[in-house]
Image (tube, coloured by chain):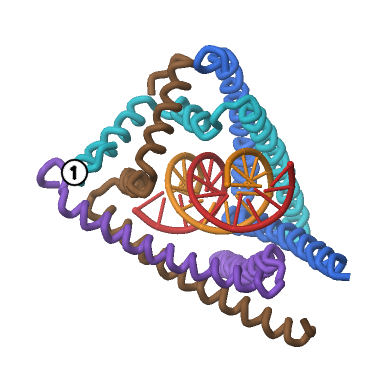
Chain colours: A brown, B purple, C cyan, D blue, E orange, F red
Amino acid sequence: MSDIVAADRLKTLIERIERVEEEMDGVKEDRKEIYSEAKGEGFDTKALRKLVKIRKMDRAKYQEEQAILELYGQAIGENI
Amino acid sequence: MSDIVAADRLKTLIERIERVEEEMDGVKEDRKEIYSEAKGEGFDTKALRKLVKIRKMDRAKYQEEQAILELYGQAIGENI
Amino acid sequence: MSDIVAADRLKTLIERIERVEEEMDGVKEDRKEIYSEAKGEGFDTKALRKLVKIRKMDRAKYQEEQAILELYGQAIGENI
Amino acid sequence: MSDIVAADRLKTLIERIERVEEEMDGVKEDRKEIYSEAKGEGFDTKALRKLVKIRKMDRAKYQEEQAILELYGQAIGENI
DNA sequence: GATGCGCTTTAAATGC
DNA sequence: GCATTTAAAGCGCATC
């Protein structure tokens, strides 16, 4: 790679990355507003977030995680 | 909230959240592809990521500095 | 406050803050090592973290959170 | 692991974690007191916090820069 | 090709 | 209640 070409190319790449990162910030803002709207209507956003996360997760995996947590809890005499 | 929890409204909100999260995944994918492209051209993506990070830190630092200047300005203004 | 006194005093305060923050980093490191040790013995650190968190929480609060999550889940036809 | 889960070992680990977390709370308390002391002397703690943050950013940025230099150095070294 | 590790990103908690 | 700070999760990379 000749130096000049690499420098220009690098610049282009960085600009493209920074552009998509700006887009990401925009979309994040949109999501934030939806949660904010939900909150304004009285929903519990913490529960909402958990629910969205669980729906995204693999079902079997979620149950497995819960089982381990319960197992550990029982081992130390804690009711989960 | 009407019937224990407003199920329809809840569903709508969750669907909207899931839609923007899909958008987010798309944008993430775009970024991933740019890095992948860079890698294919022989750039060191770890270094590239650091570079992007430093540039972001610069911007953040500049903003922090402006914010602190403003705070100090207010402090002086208030003490006159 | 005369300027010179304030400047010296400010410096002292900042140094003290930075010192306690270093201590904090040390303690964090200790905790990290315990988790790392646990992991080395085959424990699931994700479950371990959750357990520690639950123990720290108020019991009633935890159950309340779980109840809301289930309620929302049922409302949209999701089994938690 | 012997009996489903090594209960005693688990307990010990959790106790150790909880102990270091108590230490952390102590150190946090120390920091809080310093800020409180500063406030009592008329310093603007919000500005103070920003100042500490900027100094931390400086250090972080310096380290990032060193890291990137090292990465570039390696890249050149490898291409010889 | 799986496992582990470090870094980025996301969620939760705290303090004003 | 909002902004900041802190903790947890997820992701990508490198290694075996």
Q: Quadrant of residue A32?
A: bottom left
Q: What type is the residue that disc 1 sits on?
A: Ala
At mark 1, the secondary structure is: helix
Q: Is residue A43 above or below residue A14?
A: above
The answer to which of A58 and A77 lies nearer the viewer is A58
Q: Quadrant of residue A57?
A: top left
Q: Is residue A54 above or below residue D19?
A: below
Give how far across and how far down residue B61 sits, in percent: 64, 67
For the point 50% across and 28% down, the residue is C52
Can residue B32 be seen in the rendering of this structure? yes
Q: Quadrant of residue B52?
A: bottom right
Q: Is residue A48 above or below residue D63?
A: above
Q: Which residue is tagged 1?
A: C75
Give how far across and how far down residue A19 sits, in percent: 52, 76
In the rendered image, the quadrant that contains the N terminus of chain A is bottom right
Can residue B61 be seen in the rendering of this structure? no
The answer to which of A10 and D15 lies nearer the viewer is A10
Q: Is residue B68 left or right of residue C79?
A: right
For the point 62% across and 71% down, the residue is B59
Give the residue furthest to the left.
B2
For the point 41% across and 38% down, the residue is A61
Neighbourhood count class around disc 1 (C-alpha, 10 Å): few under 14, some 14–19, many 20 upward? some
Q: Is residue B13 left or right of residue A76?
A: left
State which chain disc 1 sits on: C
For the point 62% across and 69% down, the residue is B56
Give how far across and how far down residue C37 sits, in percent: 66, 28
In the rendered image, the quadrant that contains the C terminus of chain A is top left
Circle count: 1
Q: Is residue E7 above or below residue A25?
A: above
Give the residue furthest to the bottom.
A4
Give how far across and how far down residue C7 sits, in percent: 75, 58
The answer to which of A2 and D34 lies nearer the viewer is A2
